[in-house]
């Protein structure tokens, strides 16, 4: 018998599917070529219309919105100038309240991106703090005098390249920024700063927001003595940021105290979730500590090792097995393939693999994401097989942070993975009705073939495959909360694993190639398996355990 653990209790953020929306490019309701909140409202029925048997709804359970606060948009919203208001680009606070109400009517939870490592340099806090050394907010950011030679205070670097210090004429001091110079880091060591942030968090929770995704949640704390980071032995990385041991500018013990305090606030409200980006280059081992020693920090830490895995069964299973081993008892894992900071998975994996079947990769990736033990996070458009747009003219690049860098250390533009959602084959792919308007980013040229309207009509489309998998997940306890167990210890061409509870067992079979012979390492009952989802086999048919798989077959079976 399978023993249930504390982690098998059902809450929406464990059993549901989260869908990330990049507001700039999801849906444009006013025809100005830029996505907005009213556009999202108009598309809610596509995400979940409240009908579990819907023929057109995707069936997700929560939306996570990339930042929508007021911002000068130097980093496309990740530079907040007013935490209490909505950017005019997207609408108004009243629009957000309508979005919240309409989402909740349909059973959709709403998660906000919370950018609290830094603000915009146009935030009134920073404007006041930078005005003089003796103003009331003088210590709300990280200020340091120049070094004796007049240079930067220490060797702390920006993740986007170059020094992390920028000189301010008014104060005759440097301020620190983990990212761009327009994004000064908040001084979390100041109790007044904490109180102001915590008051703001309660403001949004009181409005009914269902949780937050903490941006860059591992870099809040800084060493109070501003000590130099040691250089790694024999370091040769072209990106100088990776050549330092970041002992003093990120992930200090105080960082976890901050997250625990935020979690305490979250727990004052019923049924809310706290998600956190533990930094893009953190390992799974490093990220696991963000659950907290008593599961009192993040509910769902985000890590990047799974999406960055090569498209190969052994590597992918290794990442799943690592999560199984490292996730603490009573805690819960999360999985994603894409987000706004990395290339889309079909662009990464199809290009870098020998597979001649992109649809096979899309179906296999969807099945893995939606059948492993953890909360799946979808990125808008992945459910229709969107890929990166690599043909964005230089004058249309919107990722200003990285393209304006003059160093070789800065990452490439992330715009390719942020292009407009492809709704149909009309002008601008149905994203915007403004025929004479240039969209914020150009629509991918494949939109006439890859779009929601066309794929809804095709029973064999990747969109309908996602819909089937999401429905199967909702209807089967084992896929929601069951334990995970591999049936092939060292996979080469296939993945075979089960999700199981005391009540049921679900078997997932995935063929990564043309190799048909299937050999599993574990004994398992051979007869009376019901086909739940398959790109090859007849759904609902009762079959015996297959000993061969068709090329690129993906099948989910229940016993």
Image (spheres, rainbow, N blue to C red):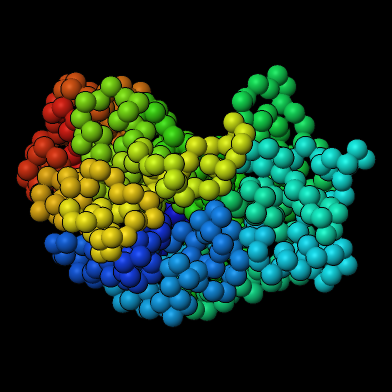
Residue 556 in picture, x, y percent from top left? 20, 42
Question: In the displayed structure, does residue 296 sit left or right of residue 483?
Answer: right
Q: Which residue is painted at 43% across and 73% down in the image?
A: 91
Residue 262 in picture, x, y percent from top left? 62, 64
**Front in this rendered view, residue 87 or 494:** 87
Question: In the displayed structure, does residue 54 sit left or right of residue 240?
Answer: left
Q: Which residue is painted at 59% across and 70% down in the image?
A: 83
**Front in this rendered view, residue 438 or 113:** 438
Q: How many labels were placed on the picture?
A: 0
**Front in this rendered view, residue 527 or 236:** 236
Residue 412 in picture, x, y percent from top left? 50, 37
The quadrant in which residue 183 appears is: bottom right
Q: Which residue is painted at 25% across and 64% down in the image?
A: 433
The vertical placement of 486 against 447, above or below, is: above
| Residue placed furthest toward the front | 436
**Front in this rendered view, residue 506 or 59:** 59
Residue 12 in picture, x, y percent from top left? 38, 63
Q: Which residue is painted at 87% across and 63% down in the image?
A: 133
Say whether residue 211 is visible. no
Say whether residue 433 is visible. yes
| Residue placed furthest toward the top | 234
The vertical placement of 77 against 349, above or below, is: below
């Amino acid at each position: 018998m399978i023993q249930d653990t504390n982690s098998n209790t059902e809450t929406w953020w464990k059993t549901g599917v989260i869908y990330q929306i990049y507001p700039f490019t999801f849906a444009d309701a006013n025809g100005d070529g830029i996505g907005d909140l009213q556009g999202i409202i108009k598309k809610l029925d596509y995400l979940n219309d409240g009908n579990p048997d819907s023929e057109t709804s995707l069936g997700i359970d929560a939306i996570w919105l990339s930042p929508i606060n007021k911002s000068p948009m130097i980093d496309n919203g990740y530079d907040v100038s007013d935490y209490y208001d909505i950017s005019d680009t997207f609408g108004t606070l009243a629009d957000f309240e309508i979005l919240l109400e309409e989402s909740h009517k349909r059973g959709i939870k709403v998660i906000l991106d919370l950018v609290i490592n830094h603000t915009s340099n146009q935030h009134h806090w920073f404007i006041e703090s930078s005005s003089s050394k003796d103003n009331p907010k003088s210590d709300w950011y990280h200020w340091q005098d120049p070094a004796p030679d007049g240079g930067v205070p220490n060797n702390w670097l920006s993740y986007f390249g170059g020094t992390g210090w920028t000189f301010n004429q008014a104060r005759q001091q440097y301020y620190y920024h983990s990212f761009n110079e327009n994004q000064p880091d908040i001084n979390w060591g100041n109790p007044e700063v904490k109180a102001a942030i915590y008051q703001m968090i309660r403001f949004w929770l009181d409005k009914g927001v269902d949780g937050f995704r903490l941006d860059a949640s591992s870099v809040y704390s800084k060493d109070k003595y501003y000590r130099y980071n040691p250089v790694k032995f024999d370091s040769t990385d072209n990106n100088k940021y990776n050549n330092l041991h970041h002992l003093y500018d990120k992930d200090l013990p105080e960082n976890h105290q901050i997250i625990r305090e935020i979690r305490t606030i979250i727990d004052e409200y019923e049924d809310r979730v706290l998600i956190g980006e533990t930094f893009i280059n953190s390992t799974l081992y490093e990220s696991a500590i963000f659950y907290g020693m008593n599961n009192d920090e993040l509910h769902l830490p985000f890590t990047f090792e799974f999406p960055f895995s090569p498209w190969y069964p052994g590597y992918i299973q290794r990442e799943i097995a690592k999560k199984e081993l490292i996730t603490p008892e009573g805690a819960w894992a999360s999985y994603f393939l894409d987000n706004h900071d990395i290339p889309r998975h079909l662009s990464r994996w199809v290009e870098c693999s020998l597979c001649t079947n992109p649809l096979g990769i899309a179906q296999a990736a969807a099945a893995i994401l939606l059948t492993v033990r953890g909360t799946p996070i979808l990125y808008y458009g992945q459910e229709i097989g969107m890929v990166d747009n690599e043909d964005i003219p230089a004058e249309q690049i919107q990722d200003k942070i990285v393209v304006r860098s003059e160093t070789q250390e800065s990452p490439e533009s992330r715009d390719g993975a942020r292009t407009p959602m492809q709704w149909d084959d009309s002008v601008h792919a149905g994203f915007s009705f403004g025929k004479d308007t240039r969209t914020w980013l150009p629509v991918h040229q494949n939109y006439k073939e890859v779009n929601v309207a066309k794929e809804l009509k095709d029973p064999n489309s990747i969109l309908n495959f996602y819909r089937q998998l999401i429905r199967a997940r909702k209807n089967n306890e084992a896929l929601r909360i069951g334990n995970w167990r591999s049936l092939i210890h060292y996979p080469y061409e296939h993945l075979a694993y089960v999700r199981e509870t005391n009540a049921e067992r679900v078997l997932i079979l995935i063929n990564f190639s043309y190799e048909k012979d299937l050999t599993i390492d574990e004994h398992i009952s051979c007869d009376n398996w019901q086909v739940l989802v398959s790109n090859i086999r007849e759904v609902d048919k009762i079959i015996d355990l297959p000993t061969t798989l068709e090329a690129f077959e993906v099948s989910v079976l229940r016993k």
